[in-house]
Amino acid sequence: MSYTLYYLPAASSFSVHIMLAEAGAEYKAIAVQRGKAGLETPEGNHLSQVNPKGTAPALIHNGTLRTEAAVIGRYLAAQFPDKLYFPQEGEEMWEALELSNYLSTDLHKTHTPLFEGLGHIAEAKEKTFERLDRTYTYLNNVLEGKKYLLGDKISILDFYLFNVMLWADMVDYDLSKFPNLIAFQKTVRERPSVAQALKEEGLA
Ligand SMILES: N[C@@H](CCC(=O)N[C@@H](CS)C(=O)NCC(=O)O)C(=O)O
């Protein structure tokens, strides 16, 4: 019944790592690293032998592979409904689904050119930062008057947002102009699950 998570330290797999800790799940977290031909397991095998997409996160549960950070979050919320919140019906569910998609696409994937070394091309960096400005402005507004993205109750979306916000320093993007996001980051960082995942990924 235990879970095996293949993660790249600080990458989008971090949100899954937090969720496993938050749920109190029994899990094994295996760090992969960047090799010549992509991500590699500690044995030196290409991660595509585990996940044909070759990307992290990859989660194995009951012999089944789950991929896609946002979907793995939903999967874990279904397994641990008392510990991991994602609304199941009504307007709140549609709002949460929109946000989930927004985090995966407009926020998460906007960083890819920067991680792929295009940050040194001034125009690419400027355009990417403009997009991040728009995306983070929207999310900062969503958080206005709220503790978490969906209100007072922390949800799996918050772990994903917290995860991606860790990348701001890595790509030299300044988040300090977004006070709601900064307050949110501080609140989420205080959770024991976050401390546990940071420690296990060698980030604390
Ligand atoms: N669509 C996937 C994307 C996963 C993804 O791009 N993971 C990155 C780390 S954040 C990765 O594995 N990059 C390594 C590579 O592409 O070689 C998801 O949402 O989980």
Image (cartoon, rainbow, N blue to C red):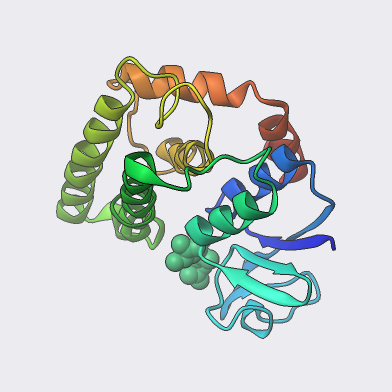
Residue 103 image point, x, y percent? 37, 48
> Is residue 175 toward the left or the right of residue 183 in the image?
left
Relative depth, front residue between 182 and 67 = 67
State whether residue 9 appears in this view.
no
Q: Nearer the viewer, residue 190 or 112?
A: 190
The residue under the point 49% across, 44% down is: 160
Residue 139 visible in this rendered orientation of the protein: yes
Q: Residue at x 47, y 21 (%)?
A: 152
Q: Nearer the viewer, residue 105 or 63?
A: 63
The image position of residue 191, as x and y in percent, is 66, 25
Q: Locate the C terminus and report the quarter of the image it occupies.
A: top right
Left or right: 4 in relation to 125:
right
Query: Is residue 192 placed above or below 197 in the rendered structure?
Result: above
Image coords of residue 11 (percent x, y):
55, 53
How far across and how far down the image is residue 131, in percent?
20, 46
94 over 161 or under it: above or below? below
Figure disc tally: 0
Looking at this rendering, what residue extends furthest in the front direction?
Answer: 90
* Image point (69%, 47%), residue name: 80
* Quadrant (top left, top right, bottom left, bottom right) of the N terminus: bottom right
